[in-house]
């Protein structure tokens, strides 16, 4: 918390007040908790709703081709699980990377929702191993996607011009 209190960020010539806690879109974030854990359940709930709407609409339209459904799911629903992943994902991604791909325990709500929906779209049984589900879908584990997003943000931060808000955040 001392880092938050010592941070001195400016934007457009004004000092930005640092805070230890804030609420954004109904999710409370605190400086002592990993961001990813705070928002995981909310992202999964939004993704469940989006997946249900997506599957219902695909059924109405008579869409059945698995590859098409996977492409649409990835574009329209999966993005809700990974929204702003560059910011919140490193902690969850590190925890996920320590688990075997085939293991089911300890996964966050977003990962559970992701594999649950992939199983349904592929017509696989609930007991199908995660590694099999991902291989059949041609997808990487969700945490790999999150790490790639975080790496892109890091590269942008490092390349930020001196004095920019991004650079100030990096240097704080």
Image (cartoon, rainbow, N blue to C red):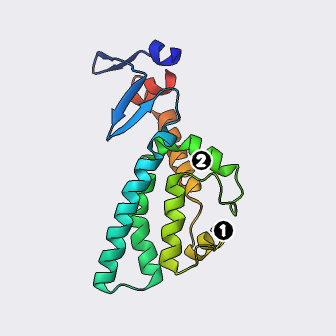
Q: Is residue 78 above or below residue 123?
A: above
Q: Position of residue 45 (x, y in %)?
A: 40, 55
> How far from the left and from the top, in percent, is residue 98?
70, 49
Residue 67 visible in this rendered orientation of the protein = yes
Task: Report which residue position mark 2 lands on.
Answer: 93
Whether residue 76 is visible to the viewer of this picture, yes or no, is no
Residue to which mark 1 is pinned: 131
Q: Secondary structure at mark 2?
A: helix
Q: Nearer the viewer, residue 169 or 162?
A: 169
Name the residue located 69 percent from the left edge and 60 percent from the top edge.
103
Asked whether 159 or 54 is in front, the reply is 54
Where residue 159 appears, as percent x and y from the top left, is: 49, 35
Q: Residues within 10 Å of mark 2 (few under 14, many from 20)?
A: many
Front residue of 145 and 106: 106
Q: Is residue 90 left or right of residue 59?
A: right
Quarter holding residue 163: top left
Specify which label sits upstream in the sequence, 2 or 1.
2
């Amino acid at each position: 918390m001392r880092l938050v209190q010592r941070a001195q960020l400016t934007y457009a010539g004004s000092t930005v007040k640092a805070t230890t806690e804030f609420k954004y879109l109904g999710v409370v974030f605190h400086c002592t908790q990993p961001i990813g854990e705070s928002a995981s359940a909310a992202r999964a709930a939004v993704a469940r709703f989006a997946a249900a709407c997506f599957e219902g609409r695909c059924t109405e339209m008579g869409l059945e081709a698995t590859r098409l459904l996977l492409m649409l799911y990835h574009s329209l629903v999966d993005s809700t699980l990974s929204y702003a992943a560059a910011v919140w994902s490193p902690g969850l991604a590190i925890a996920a990377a320590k688990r075997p791909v085939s293991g089911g325990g300890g996964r966050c709500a977003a990962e559970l929702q992701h594999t649950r929906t992939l199983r349904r779209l592929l017509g696989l049984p609930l007991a199908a191993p995660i590694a099999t589900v991902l291989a059949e879908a041609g997808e990487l584990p969700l945490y790999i996607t999150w790490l790639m997003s975080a790496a892109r943000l890091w590269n942008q931060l490092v390349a930020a011009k001196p004095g920019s808000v991004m650079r100030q955040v990096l240097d704080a």
